[in-house]
């Protein structure tokens, strides 16, 4: 599977209408005579994931898109159970954020209230929270509405898997809260399996697409939008590799005025000072996410799977 051939989505399209659900919560069973895969997170104990987001945001009336980069860490501890019954304590923090001047100041202003916050909750192999999140924040911001709202955020980017094995064409629906383009929003997302393929290296690679709607509360009131994306996932080892999204948010009722964000999330693992792909192999030279302590805007483009 070559992630360089990006799947394009019409983010202005209406979200799929709800349908009667099948076994395991599926909306569609897909091509049941074709290849299948079990999708779940491996949740390896005592693992540190480094997630580097490189994004471009096009604001209305701004002459060009504004680039930003964010680096986050997910730490897994206290894991128990196996396969689909596995759970871990997940700890999330943002370790670096930079935005391109001059318009990056708007994104930085959105990020400022939630800096220095650590989120903790238990997660299962499907990606679903098992318990309520707890927050640790600086005293000066801990009681603000912006920080308190972070307890609702899905730190696995709304990636949620069904309970049953899936075939190409299988689809399911998820509702969650995310914070990724400088704002917190509620998503109604439909995931669909595009391709399941075994590679020469023995990995089973799954390409999934996601489409849906978003609703965000801002200082100017409620704003709605649409989004689409592609996830590349190593099904045999239960590890995400790369997620791409485009989010289109309506900022004015008249004239179709929208903010558009295009985001690449590169998943990696920390091994001391070394950063490797989630399958354990080194990144191609010149394409790895920055190591701990490096400037986030120095991140190279996300790499194919």
Image (cartoon, grey):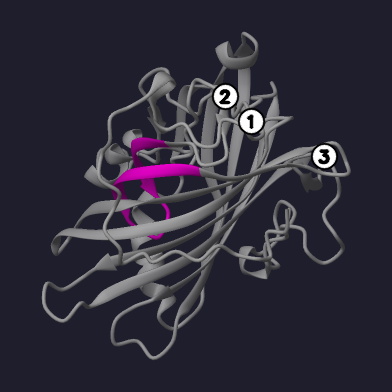
Q: Residue at x 62, y 10 (%)?
A: 80
Asked whether the viewer can see residue 141, the reply is no
How many angstroms separate mark 2 from mark 3 (CA)?
25 Å
Q: Secondary structure at mark 2?
A: loop
Relative to 135, is 288 above or below? below
Q: Main secondary structure of the magenta part?
A: strand
How many angstroms separate mark 1 from mark 3 (CA)?
24 Å
**Viewer-closest of 21 and 48:** 21
Q: Earlier in the sequence, mark 2 or mark 3?
A: 2
Indicate which disc residue 165 carries: 2
Q: Secondary structure at mark 3?
A: loop
Q: Is residue 176 magenta?
A: yes
Residue 197, image x and y in percent?
72, 42
User: In the image, which residues are magenta?
Assistant: 172-192
Q: Secondary structure at mark 1?
A: strand
Q: Earlier in the sequence, mark 1 or mark 3?
A: 1
Relative to 79, is 244 above or below? below
Q: Residue at x 28, y 37 (%)?
A: 148
> Label 2 crowding class (10 Å Cα cut-off): few <14, some 14-19, many 20+?
some
Say if mark 1 contacts mark 2, CB within 8 Å: yes
Q: Which residue is mark 1?
A: 36
Residue 17, image x and y in percent?
25, 45
Q: Which residue is mark 3?
A: 280
């Amino acid at each position: 599977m070559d992630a360089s051939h990006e799947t394009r989505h019409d983010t202005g399209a209406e979200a799929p209408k709800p349908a009667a659900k099948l076994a395991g919560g599926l909306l569609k069973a897909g091509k049941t005579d074709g290849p299948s895969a079990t999708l779940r997170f491996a949740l390896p104990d005592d693992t540190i994931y480094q997630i580097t987001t490189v994004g471009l945001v096009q604001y209305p009336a701004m002459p060009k898109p504004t680039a930003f980069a964010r680096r986050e860490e997910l730490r897994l501890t206290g894991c128990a159970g196996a396969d689909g019954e596995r759970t871990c304590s997940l700890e999330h923090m943002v370790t670096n954020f930079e935005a391109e001047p001059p318009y990056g100041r708007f994104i930085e202003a959105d990020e400022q209230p939630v800096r220095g916050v650590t989120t903790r909750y238990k997660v299962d192999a499907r990606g679903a929270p098992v318990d309520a999140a707890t927050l640790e924040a600086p005293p000066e911001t801990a009681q603000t509405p912006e920080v308190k709202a972070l307890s609702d955020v899905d730190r696995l980017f709304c990636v949620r898997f069904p309970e049953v094995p899936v075939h190409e064409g299988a689809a399911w629906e998820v509702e969650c809260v995310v914070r990724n383009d400088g704002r917190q929003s509620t998503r109604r997302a439909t995931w669909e399996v595009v391709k399941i393929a075994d590679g020469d290296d023995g990995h089973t690679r799954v390409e999934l697409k996601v489409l849906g709607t978003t609703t965000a509360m801002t200082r100017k009131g409620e704003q709605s939008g649409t989004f689409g994306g592609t996830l590349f996932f190593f099904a045999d080892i239960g590890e995400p590799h790369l997620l791409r999204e485009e989010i289109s948010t309506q900022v004015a009722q008249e004239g179709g005025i929208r903010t558009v964000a295009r985001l690449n999330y590169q998943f990696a693992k920390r091994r001391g000072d070394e950063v490797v792909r989630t399958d354990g192999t080194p990144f191609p030279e010149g394409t790895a996410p920055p190591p701990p302590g490096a400037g986030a805007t120095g991140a190279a483009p996300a790499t194919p799977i």
